[in-house]
Image (cartoon, rainbow, N blue to C red):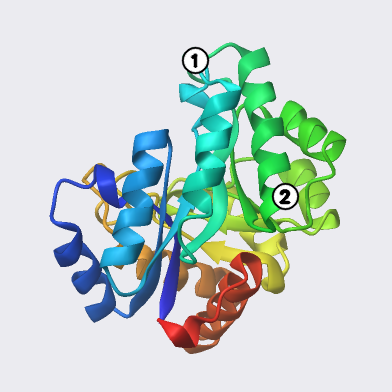
């Protein structure tokens, strides 16, 4: 089975049971559904409790941090502690592409997420969009890395990749890896060490080819794994094993439990 390390089941305009069943039929499990607000995080935990093969992460997306308060992080800690199927904190990070939250509020929230992840011993899922230097600096300042850091939908250049790898961060690739005009993403994937690779859909966003521009679903993570196998010149079967092992290690989970 190929894990989808990052999806948003609550944002997909279909019944979650159908989406998860379809993914499993495509050889995709587990699906880690990611919270981006308090309400979304509650929904992620509910989905993990309801559907076999679903795990959850809880967090506040950087675009939603303008009004975040210390009480929100107390609530996140409560949500994270409410279920053994919560395997990560996030998605957190910095997003300088969209002007939806001041940079100082995003940085404050990122620090709070890092501290929460370390307190709970959970992986940290990091969103980094046009904010590479500040993301790396903030993570370093907070000593992020143990528990593991997952760089969601990696978008940095070679220098960022090398710094992340040197720190032991996991590098997750999404649909853009399959885009015909994205040779740079494939070059960077070729440089990333096998033991740090993850794949994700970010569903319902970032559909891979040949579904680019259409709503995305977790079952399509197989297309990203196939592209990664080609980049690394290994069989899909070998890549499946690598991705299972890496996902289990990154999120601290036993994939044999479903």
- Residue 145: x %, y % from top left: 78, 53
Number of other residues with Cα within 10 Å of mark 1, as a class: few under 14, some 14 to 19, many 20 or more = few
- Residue 174: x %, y % from top left: 46, 54
Taking the image as shown, residue 227 lies to the left or right of residue 205, namely right
Mark on residue 67?
1
Query: SS for tag 1?
Result: loop
Q: Quadrant of residue 209?
A: bottom left
Of residues 32 and 85, the one nearer the viewer is: 85
Query: SS for tag 2?
Result: helix
Question: Mark 2 highlights which residue?
Answer: 119
- Residue 220: x %, y % from top left: 31, 64
Of residues 70 and 153, the one nearer the viewer is: 70
Q: Residue shown at 20%/73% (left/top)?
A: 21
Of residues 50 and 161, the one nearer the viewer is: 50
Q: Residue shown at 58%/75% (left/top)?
A: 248
Alpha carbon separation for disc pair 1 and 2:
23 Å
Give the mark nearest the N terminus, 1 or 2.
Answer: 1
Q: Quadrant for the N terminus, please.
A: bottom left
Residue 19 vertical placement versus 76 (above, below)? below
Q: Quadrant of residue 38?
A: top left
Q: Residue shown at 48%/52% (left/top)?
A: 57
């Amino acid at each position: 089975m190929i894990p989808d390390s990052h999806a948003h089941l609550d944002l997909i305009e279909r019944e979650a049971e159908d989406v998860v069943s379809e993914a499993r039929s495509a050889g995709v499990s587990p699906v880690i559904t990611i919270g981006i607000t308090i309400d979304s995080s509650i929904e992620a935990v509910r989905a993990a409790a309801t559907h076999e093969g679903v795990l959850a992460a809880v967090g506040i997306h950087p675009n939603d941090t303008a009004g975040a308060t210390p009480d929100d992080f107390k609530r996140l800690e409560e949500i994270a502690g409410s279920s053994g199927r919560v395997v990560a904190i996030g998605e957190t990070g910095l997003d300088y592409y969209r002007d939806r939250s001041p940079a100082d509020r995003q940085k404050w929230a990122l620090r709070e997420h890092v501290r929460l992840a370390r307190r709970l011993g959970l992986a940290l899922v990091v969103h980094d969009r046009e904010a590479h230097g500040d993301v790396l600096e903030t993570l370093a300042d907070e000593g992020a890395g143990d528990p593991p850091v997952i760089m969601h939908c990696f978008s940095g250049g070679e220098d960022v990749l090398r710094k992340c790898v040197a720190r032991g961060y996991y590098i997750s690739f999404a649909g853009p890896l399959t885009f015909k005009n994205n040779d740079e993403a494939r070059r960077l994937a070729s440089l990333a060490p096998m033991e740090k690779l993850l794949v994700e859909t970010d569903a319902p966003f970032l559909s891979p080819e040949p579904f680019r521009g259409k709503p995305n679903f977790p079952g399509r993570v197989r297309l990203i794994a196939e592209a990664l196998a080609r980049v690394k010149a290994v069989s899909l079967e070998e890549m499946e094993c690598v991705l299972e092992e890496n996902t289990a290690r990154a999120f601290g989970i036993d994939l044999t439990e479903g």
